[in-house]
């Protein structure tokens, strides 16, 4: 014998309209999760075409940077890296052509 189903509680969404600046402020409010690579994204947003953001990172961090950039800036960026001394890599991020 099948169980009797209880009616589902439908909770309607409550919407509000925000300005872009207010939405950014709310997202950056304390308590929200931010990636450790967010500062790189912040620098990339201000990066002009024809300039390159360069820094040193470990092999695991290079992969983390690549994933972060792909998730947040799909098609807008190019990440190149080359091995330097020891296990460190020099990372170059630029705007896509």
Image (tube, helix red, strand yellow):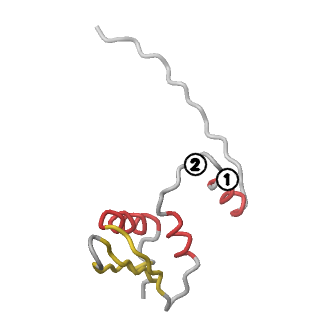
Residue that numbered label 2 is attached to: 32
Coordinates of residue 75 in the picture (x, y in percent): 41, 76
Instruction: Count the numbered circles shown.
Output: 2
Residue under the image location 56 percent in, 75 percent down: 45
In the image, residue 38 sits, relative to residue 8, either above or below, namely below
In the image, residue 17 sits, relative to residue 13, either above or below, namely below
- Marks 2 and 1, the one that precedes in the sequence: 1
- Residue at disc 1, secondary structure: helix
Quadrant position of residue 85: bottom left
Q: Is residue 35 left or right of residue 12?
A: left
Residues under labels 2 and 1: Cα distance?
A: 9 Å
Coordinates of residue 92 in the picture (x, y in percent): 40, 81
Residue under the image location 50 percent in, 24 percent down: 8
Give the quadrant of the C terminus.
bottom left
- Residue at disc 2, secondary structure: loop
- The residue mark sitting in front, 2 or 1, is 2
Coordinates of residue 71 in the picture (x, y in percent): 42, 64
Residue at far top of view? 1
Residue under the image location 48 percent in, 57 percent down: 35
Coordinates of residue 39 in the picture (x, y in percent): 53, 66
Of residues 11 and 50, the one drawn nearer to the viewer in this rendering: 50
Residue that numbered label 1 is attached to: 26
């Amino acid at each position: 014998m099948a169980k009797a189903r209880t009616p589902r509680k439908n909770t309607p969404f409550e919407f509000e309209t925000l300005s872009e600046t207010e939405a950014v402020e709310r997202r950056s409010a304390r308590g929200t999760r931010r990636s450790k690579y967010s500062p790189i994204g912040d620098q990339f947003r201000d990066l002009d075409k024809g300039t390159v953001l360069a820094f040193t990172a470990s092999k695991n961090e290079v992969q983390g940077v690549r994933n972060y950039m792909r998730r947040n800036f799909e098609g807008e960026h190019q990440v190149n890296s080359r091995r330097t001394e020891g296990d460190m890599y020099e990372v170059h991020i630029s705007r896509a052509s």
